[in-house]
Amino acid sequence: MTTTAPATKPTNPRFSSGPCAKPPTFSLDKLADAPLGRSHRAAVGKAKLLAAIETTRDVLGIPADYKIGIVPASDTGAYEMAMWNLLGERPVEMLAWESFGSGWVTDVVKQLKIEAKVTTADYGEIVNFADVNFDNDVCFTWNGTTSGVRVPSKDVIPSDRDGLTLCDATSAAFAMDLPWDRLDVTTFSWQKVLGGEGGHGVIILSPRAVARLESYTPAWPLPKIFRLTKGGALIDGIFTGATINTPSMLCVEDYLFALDWAKSVGGLTGLIARADANTGAINDFVAANDWIDFLAVDPATRSNTSVCLKFADDRIADGAAFAKAIAKRLEAENVALDVGAYRDAPAGLRIWCGATVETADIEAMLPWLAWAFDQEIQAQA
């Protein structure tokens, strides 16, 4: 029983799963070179946007023949853009094992009115990829941000498929080794693993996806903000720095800073190692405490970014109320902010372990979690 509050607190108590913690070296003066008050279509604006695109390619190891674009409305806008432009040419399979994947199912079935095959799994589980026909177009999240469950291996996606894969990778990019040869459309927002400012999305297209765009016209009208082609040809400017709408050059500068920081810690390999170290600290804590467990059932599918935890103690009468009380105590002590489970997810905690979080802060927070648990158990006794 932990009755005495720990002596050490995290230096940075921000463990939110989005927007996420800024890189440890961040300060506002790092953004001094932002071309504020200038047109994003001026040479300086286009150069910044192109630098963001090409540095993304460099850090993530994206093939040279893949197209990368900065688009409006965060990952949501990027993924909606992909679905509205590309789906409908062949049968569609929708895979969902958490709330965001379920949202894509709703949009395809109810908004686009496509008679898709829908395969779901409960929170903590994942679908059986052996049952998926990748000769169809397949939509899925790589990492379930609200369930802490991720695709276990690139091998579940065949390299010789006929259909396109549309992957929402918003809490996976920059923390997991994404297999570009298996992904035709990949989207993310830089407010996740790199802690960038919100509002902008990134869409990455394989040559196969570009070929589909240039050969297929959807049956439904496309809003201007979604259009990737004109006259049957890809609008190449989107992928060289001429964005669809006006971007925030301050946010772009922030992203460029984050990309430079990513390179300074060893690029993608270093970013993955940092996230793995953070998750490893939680894994050790869970192994040592039988009252808490991962929501993800199979260790092979456990996320190294959005780590979802559940309480496992017979003394807990109301799991949802208990989890909220724990999160409230941790926030009141300023040791862990925004760690409650997502509203649609099972009761518990969600601790962001992406690369911008320092392992020392995770290690300092965990004794406080044990303290808060004991305090709450005593309070309800």
Image (cartoon, rainbow, N blue to C red):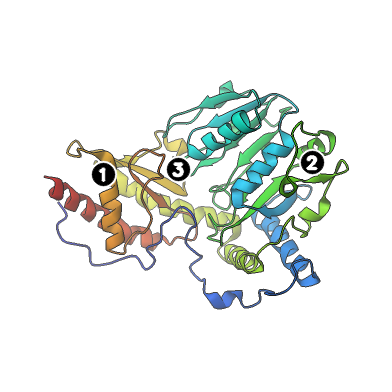
Q: Nearer the viewer, mark 2 or mark 1?
A: 1
Residue found 58% across the figure and 50% down from its top = 173
Count residues near mark 2 (Cα–Cα under 10 Å), then give few for <14, some for 14-19, many for 20+.
Answer: some
Q: Nearer the viewer, mark 1 or mark 3?
A: 1
Residue found 47% across the figure and 49% down from its top = 305
Q: Does any portion of residue 152 appear in the rendered image?
A: no
Q: Which amino acid lies under the numbered mark 3 shown in the image of this protein? A: Thr
Residue found 53% across the figure and 52% down from its top = 272
Which mark sits nearer the N-terminus, 1 or 3?
3
- Quote the CA–CA distance across marks 2 and 3: 31 Å
Q: Which amino acid lies under the numbered mark 2 shown in the image of this protein? A: Val
Mark drawn on residue 210: 2
Q: Does any portion of residue 256 appear in the rendered image?
A: yes
- Determine whether 40 is above or below 303 in the image: below
Which mark sits nearer the N-terminus, 2 or 3?
3
- Quote the CA–CA distance across marks 2 and 1: 48 Å
Q: Which amino acid lies under the numbered mark 1 shown in the image of this protein? A: Ala
Q: Which secondary structure, mark 1?
A: helix
Which mark sits nearer the N-terminus, 2 or 1?
2
* Residue sitting nearer the eye, 49 or 278: 49
Left or right of residue 337, residue 77 in this image: right
Mark drawn on residue 321: 1
